Amino acid sequence: MECVNIALPKGRLGKTVYDMLASAGFECPELLEENRRLVFENAEAGVRYFWVKPSDVSVYVERGAADMGVAGSDILREYTPEVYELLDLGVGVCRMAVAAPRGFEYHPSRPLRVATKFPNIASRYYAGQGRDIDIIKLNGSVEIAPLLGLSDVIVDIVETGKTLRENGLEAFETIMPISARLIANKASFQFKNAEISLIHSALKRITGETK
Amino acid sequence: MIIDDSLLRRDEKAAFALRALFEKHGYSRFFMGRFEEYDLYAGNKDFLADDRMISFTDIDGTLMAPKPDVTLSVIRHTSDMPGQLRKVYYNENVYRAGRGDSGFREIMQAGLECIGEVKDEDICQTVFMAVESLNALGGRCVLNISNLSFVTDVFAAAKLRPESYGHALRFVREKNAPAIRDFCLSENISPEGRELLERLIAVHGPLGTMLESIRGICPGSPALKLLERVNAYLARLGKTDGVLLDFSIVNNMAYYDGMVFQGYMEGIPESILSGGQYDALARKMGKKAGAIGFAVYLNKLEYLDK
């Protein structure tokens, strides 16, 4: 069996997914050791893991540096990488929503100002509504934009809504639900099909049990 | 003059090998200019892999473009000849935007096109030529085959609304089981319909074996019969190794209809060969002809230069 390269998102989600993979027999214990290494291999189990920035997972997989990976459906909808999206892992569950200061109303005579880290998702959403918008692309702390008058609304990920509430905002439209997905490179799917299918099936069993 | 082929780059060697293969099987070389009128591409942007292209104003004021694609030029410069089939090949450079914002690139492409009265036998032979083209490149290769008409037959059997075919096709292209589940719920598709779609996206394996496994799905479908015919043709020539049935090859249905295929080579993270029947494109460009062809993206061989 060939070794399958798997890109995991750094952080809590990546660790949760690694636990799922480990319980399916694809463990690599040194991955959880406190050190600064980024690549870990268990040749016996046929897996090599990489920790990468969550938004880069799909890039590694699309370009074939990783055969498989775990990416949020927000990232997959934003960047639309040419990959297979094999499984909803049922973790990292949240939603993409439109939020604004409480009592917000659309201004009738000018485009809606939308601050977001996800300009493609926001553009598609408002295009579907036929609404004219002005997209303001930000890289973080999006919640502050309406408070400082930079935007009317934000399009962002909402998990519990606590950050929004603490900043006087509320989510008033849900664009889509989000969760972590198992993805695969299309060429790897051809040449490492047995190995990828094994991991896919094992995770499918586990998600079936945990949902 | 004897040329030492160790002096040639990998893509140059492949171009010679493909040219020899195409000539051997009776395809004639199609010569074309380096530029076309910009309008040819602007009017068919969805057919192109990327709608960004270089443009310039010619000395007579006409807006021109260095070719971003070969197929459109071949169709444009081929006249309708009722009852006949024109079989041509090309080896051309095209100019396309690189991924992301990495600027325009010159890309070497080789391929073949059959335009005119395309019969089932010609479709079988084109798939055979795709298999042989991959073999000519050396290395371990596979060819994935699908039939878009069969995919739409399954959509109809699952009782999808025609206006939602576009969404469903995207999920088929991604083998996206979670999205199919959500789609079926939101579209009120029956459990039987959902099962059909799930079976469709799970198909991946040797053409003959997979055709057996889907025999019960839309059994009367002419598209399925064509896939069976291709399998029999390849089997007769002993060329079924590495030929897989996989319905996730979804080209733009405004242009492609019927058989589509994609080739992969080990060590290259994306498809190196792509093609299919594009009767709809030929019709859109005012031709009465049928058309099938494929391109080999020789620039992608550079992935093998570690």
Image: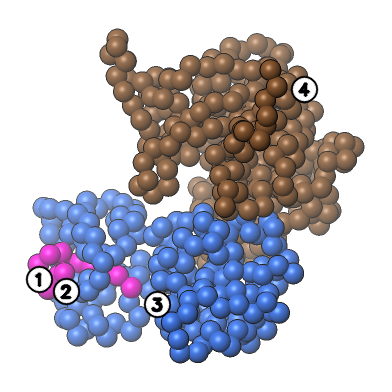
Chain colours: A blue, B brown
Of helix, strand and loop, which one carries label 1? loop
Task: Specify few, some or many for label 3: CA neighbours under 10 Å numbering under 14, 14-19, or 20 or more.
Answer: some
Residue designated by label 4: B24
In this rendering, position of residue A40 left or right of residue B99: right
| Stretch in magenta | A145-157
User: Mark 3 and mark 2: span between their CA atoms?
Assistant: 20 Å
Same subunit: marks 1 and 3? yes
Q: Earlier in the sequence, mark 1 or mark 3?
A: 3
Task: Specify few, some or many for label 2: CA neighbours under 10 Å numbering under 14, 14-19, or 20 or more.
Answer: some
Q: Chain of mark 2?
A: A
Task: Specify few, some or many for label 4: CA neighbours under 10 Å numbering under 14, 14-19, or 20 or more.
Answer: few
Q: Amino acid at mark 3?
A: Cys
Q: Nearer the viewer, mark 4 or mark 1?
A: 4
Identify the disc placed on residue A144: 2
Does the residue at mark 1 contact the one at mark 2 (Cβ under 8 Å)? yes
User: Residue A6 appears at what percent x and percent y?
Assistant: 57, 71
In this rendering, position of residue A139 left or right of residue A199: left
User: Mark 3 and mark 4: span between their CA atoms?
Assistant: 58 Å
Decide if residue A92 is in sight here.
no
Residue designated by label 3: A94
In this rendering, position of residue A101 left or right of residue A46: left
Residue designated by label 1: A148
